[in-house]
Image: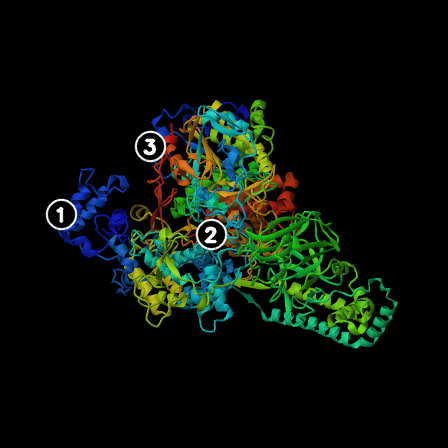
Amino acid sequence: MIGLGARGLGALGAASLLNPDLLEGGSNPDALRLSGSLETPHFKPTAKRIIYLFLSGGPSHIDLYDYHPKMREIHGIELPDSVRNGQRITGMTSGQESFPCVAPMFEFSRHGPSGSWFSDAIPEIAGIAEEITLVKSVHTEAINHDPAITAINTGSQQPGKPSMGAWLDWGIGSPNKDLPGYVVMISKGKGNAQALYDRLWGSGFLPSKHQGVKFRSAGDPVLYLSNPNGVSREMRRNMLDGISRINLAKKSETGDLEIDARIAQYEMAYRMQTSVPELVDLRDEPQHVLDLYGEDALEKGTFAHNCLIARRLSERGVPFIQLFHRGWDQHNNLPKQIRGQTKDVDQAAAALVKDLKQRGLLKDTIVICGGEFGRTIYSQGKLTKDNHGRDHHGRCFSMWMAGGGFKAGFEYGKTDDFAYNIVENPVHVNDLNATVLRALGIDHERFTYKYLGLDQRLTGVEHPKVISDLLA
Amino acid sequence: MRPILSNKCFFCHGPSEKSRKANLRLDKKDHAFDERNGVAAFAIKNLNKSEAWHRITSQDEDDVMPPPEFKKELTAEEIETLRQWIEQGAKWEDHWAFNPVIRPSPPKNSLPHWIRNPIDQFVLKTLEELNLSPSPEADKRTLVRRLYFDLTGLPPRPGEIDSFVLDHSPHAYEKVVDHLLRSDAYAERMTLVWMDAARYGDTSVFHDDGPRDMWPWRDWVLNAYRNNMSFDQFTIEQLAGDLLPDASVDQKIASGFNRNHATTDEGGAIAEEFRVEYVVDRVKTTSNVWMGLTMECAQCHSHKYDPISQEEYFQFFAFYNNNADSGMQTRSGNAEPMVEIVSPERKASLAKAERKVAGFTKEMKSRRGMVMDSFLAWSKETTTSYDGNLSAPEPEDLIAHLPLDEFEENVTKDLIRPPQGCLLKGKAKPIRLAKFGGGIKIEGRGFVEVRDFGNFESNQSFSFGAWVKIPRDNLTGAVLGKMDVENKHRGYDLWLEGGRPGVHLIHEWPSNAIKVVAREKIKPNQWNHLFVTYNGTAKAGGVRIYVNGKNQGKISAEDSLTKSIRTKKPLHVGGRSTSSFVKGTAIDEVRFYDRNLSPKEVGILAQSDPIGPILGIPENNRTQSQKETLLTHFLESQDEPYQKIKELKTKADKELESLRKERVTSMIMADNPANKERKTYLLMRGQYSAPDKSKEISADTPSFLPPMRKNLPKNRLGLAKWLMDENHPLTARVTVNRYWQTIFGQPLVSTPGDFGAQGSSPTHPDLLNWLAYDFRESKWNVKRMIKQLVMSSTYRQSSIVRPVHRKKDPENLYYSRASRFRLMGEFVRDNALFVSGLLNQTFGGPGVRTYQPPGLWNEVALRPVVKFVRDDGDKLYRRSMYTYWKRSAPHPGLMAFDAPTRETCTLQRQRTNTPMQALVTLNDEQFVEAARAFAQRILQSGRKSISGKIDWAFQCATGRSADSLRLEVLKNAHHHHLEIFEKEPDRAQELLAIGESPRDASISQAEHATWTILGSMILNLDETMNRE
């Protein structure tokens, strides 16, 4: 219970927010009961919730994780046709006159039991190497942002499908009745940023109540949360009591049981008006915790701040928390921009894992970190002594998972020396989603919703596989 | 039986050849009963001989069907259903929705007095079977409010309710129905539903999600509903309006139905991939909306459940595959093809502005002719006084000269080839003060296009250049380029590489080309004369680059040219064929010579005086173009009347330009012409990059449906007419099902987008058939159909739920009562605006940006410049269907109330109940303002007592009086809040300041604020937000 001061627990009745099973490892058989449309999971879950650190724009796997010492030798040479193998590349570089390979302009060192390579741009993440499963062989068919980010978040490149968070909110629900089950937070780095779309946390064909609820850094933390100016909490209570009395009368006049639901929703809205501000109020966080997340921890709208909020949400049982950090589209000025982006992310992401661990939450929380694709070994634009860019690359990229039943200190998948093609253990983005579902106790093939004649699945119509090697 | 087989068996034993196992089909009668090697899947009345029965009941993991790994186990009930079906004779039925629509006779019932029309006969028949009886008719207040919401999405005014209640004539109800069907609000209500189906939006969805104008299409739909356009015409014009003979502008606008889908502008996108995606979307939307078919399932492989092969999918695809719009569209505005919408007023004002410009142009020309005497005198005098050190004549062999001084309709002249106009295109504009007279400025992808000129060969000598002013010293781009970027950069250019002028002469980049770059950068923000000479030797050494007359030191980067540099791409001033535009650069005085000029000659050109060299030439030796240049110079510098006219013309030009910028367009469908018709091939695995070129596919409809009539063209027009063919089993059924959903709140077939094997069966199959038949026979009369629905006794029942309902029909699938449900999100807001008196009922037009929390666009947008700017005044109170619909970040208040993003076709909205909805209606500025305006209306209603005021407010919001409990609750609230606001006047002031509309300051603040609270409570009541 570290980090939840008396103020948080007592005055605002937050005790009910904390599911007692959370910290006890689910020894109670009822702990398996879900509150979504799945009554119980298909398998015994190893995780109850997810914190997804989504780095939007396509972080370069080559400059962060997927290092091959041979890259130093191929620096400057033209990408061999045998490597490119006729693969399609984006319209941004397909007209390029040459494709010189670029070794990362970062130093790399090995960490953790698997001796995984980490760039010197992410020393803190390197420091948690023993906690994570690093997958170097994630791949996607998409080569441009919009289709790729839509595919990894919804299982399909085309709009219209529910996001992973909406699927889970629909399927497993939330043990916390005073907070949304799916929370989204957005931050932006200084690097070249790509657009996001409401569909990335949208509910698609699922009921719209499962769409992600944005926690925002400016204005109300949740849209429309505050009472209008001039209206106090006591006045609002008086209003709601009056509304409820009339609604109850209406219920007995009409026999419409849905009115009970409306009354309950108004009450939840009222509770959210305190539970959300209490949640985002970091005054009860001790200094050493703030220090862990870094100097941005108290600055609203930063990735570090959002990581800390994410931890607080996970303590309260919120099952799906997704951070989007923008600015990872390094078509040019890559070395400098990557440093800017990792400065935002490195310490806070590692802090989150450590903080969850010290609170006993990491064992049933999956932290996922990665973007919609990686980047090319060849330079986009001019390659100079200290500068270059890289184009999009979907044929392989790196992501990592920590906690929630994923192996710790593990590396999976291999790419060639150009970090261009996968040579061992490919993991399609839908395989990854299927595996994450598996950790939550869900069989992705049976996790379906009938829409337009099909048993729709998060993981699409092809047959993705659970990569059980990733799970402990 | 059939739904079980479909759901559990068709995947392997259905229409798809590829996934079919044991060559067994259970979707076809002959296969299912066929005996092969003495075994049949089903044997009539004989479980023992039915192999399927053995397999589904087998305990052996290897034998049991469906196979366990398939995870589609049959339930005990399903097995029992199959047992009974086999034992009772295994009567085979083809899938209901694909059978022809035949008119069933309305059944006889036990309650003839309840029957108002055949709908009631069918509904009552089912109720009788379930031992249920219909509910009594709703009280008149409830009924008329329901009718208003269902037909218009708006509530009745208290006076309208009263006059209906007091009208005891037998046609009282019908009069209201007819009145409402004639209203604009009816058209808006119907259009809103269609906007979901048509995936309407005000932005392009993919990548940048930039703005577009498709509201003229929406206006077309509004007018179609208002004028009760028949559904067949409605269909034909939207699917193929552009192909109708002598298609009107309106018919073309209608065809924009198929331009509403998502489009991309992403730089790295592969155009063909997205073009195919657009066709896929059109196929999906057409088949979902009109046929309730999920044809999209057959894109990658034959349909697993419905009889649509992959080849048939691509035959259908072929109807749309000759589209003229491209895969790569735009982030700013509409993409071709489109039509301009010109109202008569606009036509008049455009003509007037054009006349004005033409008038001044004429005056300038005539002035030119009138000054010859004074010009000659001036010219003589100036020539005499001209000090001759620049007497060097301007070089000869000038073959093109664009002074860029005069633009008419964006066309400027090449003085050497005067009839040949050069067109200013894209993001570039004429500027008035350039190096000499006017010039141009490139502001993005813009240029002057010079056609049929400059197609030099690598063995020809030539020289060219211009005056150039660049905005920064590291600019990269082409000042002049005749270069085909997409064909290995064939051609030549004069360009800047990080501020250094350079030249390309290219056959194939980089293997067969010359590239030479100067060592020094040119200075920004000042005019520089850039000039290139080339001696035709195909060597880098044959190129010279001059800046302000000075030959530059060069670096030669490529020197491998041996072949032709000719290209058909036109010469561009400001860029290459498709790229390298010199944004921010001003250009003037473009000159081309067909020989290698000497350094001295270039020096003369670089003199900052274009007039001097001409004056240095004896008058009789001056060329026509030199004379013209001199005359222009004279007029502009010496002739006051000319200067005045020119000033006026410039103003008129600007007016015309800004008027033209206001043009309204709408995207339309168009096919490529016959000689450019795109061929269709089956795309293997559905992928754009894998066409099976062994077989060309021609447009056709799926074979399980009635064939297209012989006289129909195999194009979209033929397709649209085929959909409306009287033998088509799906269109009428699917459409009346949607109308039923619109009026009754739920459809007869609960999967309105899927009438195939995996869809739901209708709750009332005969009723659906009867309605479909009737709709078709009525010549697709929409208002008549809607009227028929609301005239029925079924519709007019009370919605009170009794215990028997909860027990026998909890979901009200059988209509033993009316349904009670929450209004659509748009109508929740419209209702609040209407009740508060704020609603602005302007009909049609572009989307409006109403209140929304700040920053929502910016936190997700690609470009921070695309900002949400809220509208003011009346536009804040338009009906919600006009809310500007940005599809990557739609209005959050409406999204909370289940509005779809409209990125794809939506045929049925969810109806959820969430805390976010409560937060919107309690706290959103829009709703708080509505409560304040409502309060003002209440206080000015003329009712004296608090009870009287509460009662009046209740009548406005719920259509009925407030009973004692409601009065008590609200009186208590009044007392409670008035005390607070009187004690804390700041609170009242703050609350009343919310929203833009003014308030009547004569009302006491405490009183107004108190009633604002009461107004908000009433607007948040379940009974206010529900249709009962």
Residue at the spot of label 1:
B47
Numbered mark located on residue A43 in the image: 3
Numbered mark located on residue B989 in the image: none
- Chain for disc number 2: B
What element does badge 1 sit on? Answer: loop
Along the viewing direction, whichever of A467 and B948 lies nearer the viewer: A467
**Residue B456: where, in percent of width, then height?**
61, 63
- Chain for disc number 3: A
- The way the protein has been coloured in the rendering is rainbow
* Whether residue B320 is visible: yes
Say whether mark 3 and mark 1 are on the same chain.
no
What element does badge 2 sit on? Answer: loop
A188 left or right, relative to B545: left
- Count of all numbered marks drawn on residues in the image: 3
Residue A407's place in the image compared with B206, above or below, is above
Q: Amino acid at mark 1?
A: Leu
Along the viewing direction, whichever of B305 and B947 lies nearer the viewer: B305
**Residue B96: where, in percent of width, then height?**
27, 58
B214 left or right, relative to A463: right
Q: Are dots 3 and 2 in contact, CB under 8 Å? A: no
- Chain for disc number 1: B
B784 left or right, relative to B96: right
**Residue B420: where, in percent of width, then height?**
64, 70
Q: Amino acid at mark 3?
A: Phe
**Residue B865: where, in percent of width, then height?**
61, 49
Residue at the spot of label 2:
B903
Q: Amino acid at mark 2?
A: Glu
